Image: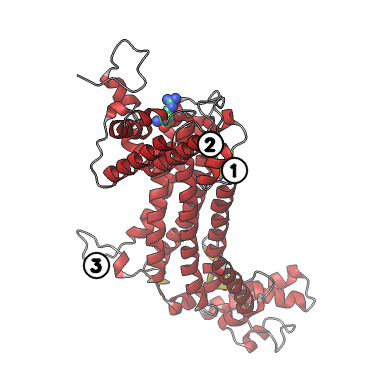
């Protein structure tokens, strides 16, 4: 015989098991047990300060919740689908342990503000954890950049050779993306660092509660300003989903490059055996499963974002059970991004950079053609004409079976007499010459390195 539920006073019939199965969130929201207990402790303390609970009741609640926490952490807590969610389950167990005081805990509180405060605490905690890990990720890119200010590779547009750049410059492009990601998590944290507790079901409560106190106790900046909004909206969850989706999009781009760079056509990098996989049939294979999975997992982070956006669309105020669908996608995105970041950091820290292959690739595709055109333009040759002369130089190089950067001065001068003795179409000269602010020249990359190191050393 099934047990009656906590809130079933008005019901004459026992709820169908199918309803329990459909309605319950306990098997996934149990992840919020710690936040739930914290929230209850803060609430009970405030109720006591306000004369709503006695000191003795508070003591009982504190002891009881400590016992419940222990049971959960030691694996002795019985999760019962009849309890519907972690909030009811903890309260029921508390009441079993301490008796009547447990029943008073829910004074001036509803599951609506309870779930809102629990979930928000979880999301804020993850904002900080992810942000800290992004710093580690940036650090691994900066460390590589440190040693490759002069390592030349072909910079690409349309995945075609374009202009020479340094590998450090390329690594710091990712550091820049990840720094913005970091800032997004931190600004979401700041914006959402407000306590829902005390909003009760939707309209607040007639009890003389102190929301400032519970907010402070739980580490929030302040209580939220409007209860109807607070129990209803989930944009704090959408923000972390968007931030994760964007971070994983950035990670998927380096993942894709690592996949391309480790092919036998490129050989720019070698992924450590520690993070590569073999084939079950082809003995010679070494596969980049790690970057492929990082790239692949981006799909689910987008899915989780779109799923919650869709859940929230058109919901009338305030709380609706639809909102219970907010949690699993967030848990999934958080767990997967943390794992993906850990392995990307490990992979980058053990990556072998094949300078020679990069340089060799740099010597195909006439990367310094723009340099020659710019050189002539600086000498007063109209750019269209400079473009044409450069085209002839490229044709000469092609005839000779070399790269434009490998033509001798005499060969260049045979094309046009306006090419002076100061003409230098080498890759190194090209790299050094692009020294405008934010550019690839080692002098500029040095400034960028300093910028990211300062950022990493902040607080
Ligand atoms: N399990 C619910 C959720 O995650 C808790 C809030 C339930 N509130 C309610 N009025 N049914 O959203």
Q: Quadrant of ligand 1?
A: top left
Q: Is the Cβ of the residue at disc 2 closer than 8 Å to that at disc 3?
A: no
How many residues crowd around disc 3 within 10 Å: few (fewer than 14), some, or many (20 or more)? few
Q: Is residue 323 left or right of residue 414?
A: left
Q: Secondary structure at mark 3?
A: loop
Residue 369 to residue 103: above or below? below
Q: At x 62% / y 35%, what residue is drawn?
A: 225
Q: Is residue 373 left or right of residue 307?
A: right
Work out which quarter of the rendered image holds the C terminus and state it: bottom right
Q: Mark 2 or 3, which is nearer the eye? A: 2
Foreground residue among 225 and 293 = 225
Residue 361 visible in the current orientation: no
Q: At x 46% / y 34%, what residue is drawn?
A: 114
Where, by quadrant of the figure, is residue 267 drawn? bottom left
Residue 247: x and y in percent read 49, 53
Residue 31: x and y in percent read 36, 42
Give the spatial CA distance, label 1 vs label 2.
9 Å
Marker disc for residue 196: 2
Foreground residue among 117 and 130 = 117
Give the spatial CA distance, label 3 vs label 1.
60 Å
Marker disc for residue 284: 3
Q: At x 58% / y 49%, what residue is drawn?
A: 190
Foreground residue among 160 and 279 = 279
Q: Earlier in the sequence, mark 1 or mark 2?
A: 2
Q: Earlier in the sequence, mark 3 or mark 1?
A: 1
Q: Secondary structure at mark 2?
A: loop
Label 2 C-beta lies within 8 Å of the nearest ligand 1 atom:
no
Residue 217 to residue 448: above or below? above
Residue 42 visible in the current orientation: yes
Marker disc for residue 222: 1
């Amino acid at each position: 015989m099934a047990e009656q539920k906590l809130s079933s006073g008005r019901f004459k019939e026992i709820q169908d098991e199918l309803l329990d199965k459909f309605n319950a969130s306990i098997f996934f929201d149990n992840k919020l047990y710690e936040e739930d207990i914290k929230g209850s402790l803060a609430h009970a303390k405030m109720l006591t300060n306000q004369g709503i609970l006695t000191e003795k009741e508070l003591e009982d609640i504190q002891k009881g919740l400590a016992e419940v926490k222990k049971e959960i952490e030691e694996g002795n807590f019985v999760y019962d689908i009849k309890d519907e969610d972690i909030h009811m389950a903890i309260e029921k167990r508390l009441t079993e342990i301490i008796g009547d005081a447990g029943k008073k805990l829910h004074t001036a509180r509803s599951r609506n503000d309870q779930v809102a405060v629990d979930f928000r605490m979880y999301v804020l905690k993850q904002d900080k954890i992810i942000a800290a890990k992004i710093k580690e990720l940036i650090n691994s890119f900066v460390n590589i950049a440190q040693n490759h200010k002069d390592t030349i590779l072909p910079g690409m547009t349309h995945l075609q050779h374009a202009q020479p750049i340094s590998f450090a410059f390329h690594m710091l492009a990712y550091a820049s993306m990840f720094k913005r990601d970091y800032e997004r998590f931190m600004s979401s944290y700041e914006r959402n660092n407000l306590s829902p507790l005390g909003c009760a079901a939707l309209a607040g409560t007639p009890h003389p509660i102190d929301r400032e106190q519970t907010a402070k106790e739980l580490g929030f900046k302040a209580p939220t300003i409007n209860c109807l909004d607070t129990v209803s909206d989930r944009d704090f969850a959408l923000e972390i989903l968007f931030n994760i989706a964007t971070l994983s999009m950035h990670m998927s781009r380096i993942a894709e490059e690592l996949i391309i760079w480790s092919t036998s056509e490129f050989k720019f990098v070698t992924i450590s055996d520690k993070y590569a996989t073999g084939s079950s049939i082809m003995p010679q294979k070494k596969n980049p499963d790690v970057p492929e999975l990082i790239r692949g997992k981006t799909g689910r982070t987008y899915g989780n974002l779109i799923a919650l956006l869709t859940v929230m669309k058109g919901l009338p105020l305030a709380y609706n059970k639809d909102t219970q669908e907010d949690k699993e996608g967030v848990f999934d995105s958080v767990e997967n991004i943390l794992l993906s970041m850990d392995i990307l950091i490990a992979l980058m820290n053990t990556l072998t950079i094949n300078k020679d292959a990069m340089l060799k690739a740099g010597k195909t595709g006439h990367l310094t053609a723009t340099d020659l055109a710019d050189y002539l333009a600086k000498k007063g040759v109209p750019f269209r004409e400079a473009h044409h002369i450069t085209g002839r130089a490229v044709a000469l190089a092609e005839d000779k079976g070399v790269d434009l950067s490998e033509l001798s001065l005499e060969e260049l001068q045979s094309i046009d007499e306006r090419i002076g003795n100061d003409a230098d179409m080498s890759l190194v000269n090209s790299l050094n010459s692009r020294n405008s602010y934010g550019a690839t020249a080692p002098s500029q990359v040095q400034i960028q390195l300093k910028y990211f190191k300062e950022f990493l050393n902040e607080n």
